Amino acid sequence: MRSDKIYAIGINHLSNVSGKNKIPSITDMQKCNLYRDMLKVAGTEAFMTLNTCNRLEFYGIGNKDVALSKYIEILGGDKQYIPFMYSGDEAILHLFQMASGIGSQLIGDLEIIGQFKRAVAEAKDIGSVSGYFKRLADSCIKAAKYIRNTTSISDGTTSLSYAVIEYLKNNNLREDKKILLIGVGSFGTNIARNLVHYFPKCQLTLSNRTSARAVELGKETGALVIDYSTINEQANDYDIVITAVSDLSSPILTANTGLQKKVIIDLSSPSSVDDEIGDSNAVVSNEDLAKIINKTLDKRNADLPKAHEIISSEIKVFKDWSNFYQKSESARILKSDVLEQSMVCPFLMQIEPEVVSGFVNEMIGSYVQFIKKNDANVIPKNELPLEYIKQNKNSFSKVLQDLTRT
């Protein structure tokens, strides 16, 4: 069957990478050469690549051994990388789980579906995706959307930067609050952007050891900027203080600041807050925010069985369609044969082309309905015409019988 030739090859976060942390990647030039080479391989019906921070995978229909050798070639012969290779039903299941996010390092990952869609579109533009494979990809995307809309697999926060927002929402610390964010590296920048997006009425102020970076982000977000050296003097002017600074040699907020009844979210490493400050202020740590994330993950895990049910159902729909698609090839061949015969048949040559075309279409329609009706039966596609003749005594079966004799 055609579905037996579907394969998935690669390395991801679940793979045995012999202690290596880095997922291999592929350059644009390597990808270009790869598509060119794979399209030349006999029997290749479809081929595509998907490269993200958590996976480098090849999917296709055709010679999986050639695809595996190409994958190993991309790795440069590094034997510490051990690619997985799935084919047939295992490959189909892998594709559905990958696209839906339940096969991601972070269950319910929302980014993977967009990455998969872009990879499919790229392969389609190159001309390496057949209609059959596109149907498989569309089925994976449909299942992913259904899971996202009917389960909690993608609900809630799983990042510390958004967990800050979740904490503030849960504690009603949202309207017209003055917030000081200390540290605007990549982590702090995400926090700042989230704050102005979810709390547009808040008064955000930034501070950073490198002031130019704070000024630049301030222009983007509309936030004010204060000098890093004046933090302890000005911290009391804010309702909420968030720290996101790494490699600290000593706390940023000391007992001398006299902070009282403030909310301090300490995301720095090591801690940026003197222990004494916790006596008169609400200090929120990484561990506190991790509890919010863990609740989300527990909720997502609880819905995994439902997600698996949806995937099983959608795989069945795809395989039923695949079975019919395989058998309907005989209908396409039959139509071609009938039209070819009609061009040389003396009787049909005397009839208006529209009449002949109508007869052929009606005949093929009858044959397709027969295929659909018998789709659940195990009838090899090369035996379908003979089975149609056995089960049907009409003018169409007579034409088909004549064709099978020629």
Image (tube, grey):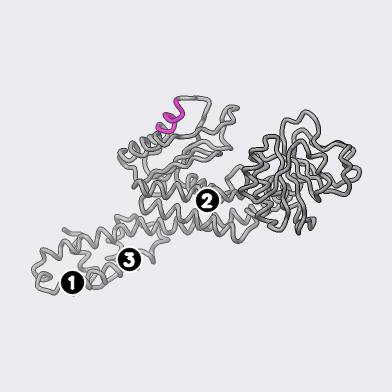
Q: Quadrant of residue 251?
A: top right
Give 29 or 84, whichever is nearer the viewer.
29
Query: Which residues are the magenta region?
Result: 70-76
Q: Is residue 29 above or below residue 216?
A: above
Query: Is residue 65 at least partly visible in the picture?
Result: no
Closer to the eye: label 2 or 3: 2
Answer yes or no: do the residues labelled 1 and 2 have beta carbons within 8 Å?
no
Look at label 1 and name its amino acid: Val
Look at label 2 and name its amino acid: Ile
Q: Is residue 21 above or below residue 296?
A: above
Mark 1: secondary structure: helix
The percent coordinates of residue 271 (x first, y second) are 79, 35
Identify the disc placed on residue 113: 2
Answer yes or no: do the residues labelled 2 and 3 have beta carbons within 8 Å?
no
What residue would you read off at disc 3? 368
The percent coordinates of residue 340 (x first, y second) are 16, 61
Classed neighbour count for the residue bearing mark 3: other residues with Cα under 10 Å, few (<14), some (14–19), many (≥20): some
Could you tell which of marks 3 and 1 lies nearer the N-terminus? 1
Q: Is residue 286 above or below residue 132?
A: above
What residue would you read off at disc 1? 356
Mark 3: secondary structure: helix
